[in-house]
Amino acid sequence: MAHYLRSNLHYCDTGAHIVFLDVAAGRYFSIPPSWNTAFRNCLAGDAPAEQADFAASKLVAAGILCGARDVGPTRDPEPFVAPTEIRANEADRVIRISMVLRALWHQMWVASDLKRHGFQYVIRDLELRRKGPFRTERVNVVTEVNSFNAAFTFTEFAISRADNCLIRSIALLRMLRAAGGDGLLVIGVTASPFSAHAWVQRGAVLLNDSLDRVRIFSPILVV
């Protein structure tokens, strides 16, 4: 019997650990390391039938794998491009009060959506607002984002940068798309010790973070 990853479940295989992100529940979890090989074999279909069925039964019972008829609508994942460039710094960027207020409002909007509607709603909204390849952009993404990032810095009196990378990144992406640009939200994880981080990038160009910071994380969700 073929087995598939349950809908709304994403995973990152770091070798020693496999970390999962349940989008519907908005939580991370992992499986015992002794299950890792069984999980990989079940998805790849490499294990003998009897062995695969036995291993899969544990993973199905844990709500990780399911049969073909239980798989909901799927969407091909966005490709991840390892970042190799960092956005250029614009020394002469001008910060407008209106932009600072927009950055603050967008962060409050994202925080409210996460609290009222949940993580899945926010991720689905990002998916719906970008249905295909990068569209023709009306702005210079790097130049625009430099101004946005400066505006976000001025909002730290109200919304701290610490532990708010998801809110800040989604807010930045919404602002960028509203301005006619585009990018991708990337959520990455480390397994031991566990940590998660979010950032925005356009191709290989990081838009709101540093290469030294994000290179320690392995992507688990790109949207």
Image (cartoon, helix red, strand yellow):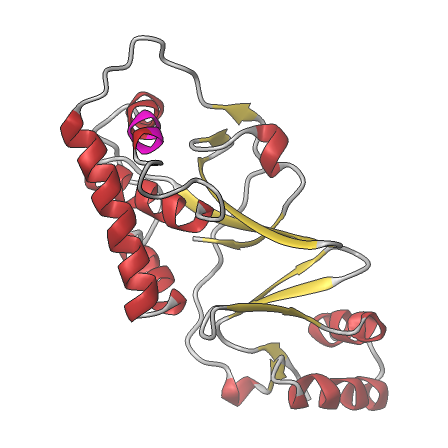
**Could you tell me residue 6's position as x and y percent?**
55, 78
Quadrant of the drawing holding the N terminus: bottom right
Residue in view at x 60 percent, y 34 percent: 213
**Could you tell me residue 151's position as x and y percent?**
28, 29
Q: Is residue 151 magenta?
A: yes
Q: Is residue 135 magenta?
A: no
**Quadrant in the rendering for residue 73:** bottom left
**Could you tell me residue 114's position as x and y percent?**
34, 63
**Could you tell me residue 28's position as x and y percent?**
58, 67
**Quadrant in the rendering for residue 120:** bottom left
Q: Is residue 128 left or right of residue 5?
A: left
Depth order, front residue of 120/57: 120
User: Relative to 104, does residue 96 appear above or below in the rendering?
Assistant: above
Residue in view at x 43 percent, y 50 percent: 166
Q: How many marks?
A: 0
Residue most toward the left?
Answer: 98
Residue most toward the front?
Answer: 157
User: Relative to 69, does residue 44 appear above or below in the rendering?
Assistant: above
Residue in view at x 43 percent, y 17 percent: 88
**Observer able to see residue 44:** yes
**Quadrant in the rendering for residue 126:** bottom left
Q: Is residue 58 left or right of residue 166?
A: right
**Observer able to see residue 179:** no
Magenta residues span: 149-153
Q: Is residue 172 left or right of residue 200?
A: left
Depth order, front residue of 170/76: 170
Residue in view at x 69 percent, y 72 percent: 43
User: Relative to 30, does residue 3 appear above or below in the rendering?
Assistant: below
Residue most toward the top?
Answer: 92
What secondary structure characterizes most of the magenta part? helix
User: Relative to 207, does residue 25 appear above or below in the rendering?
Assistant: below
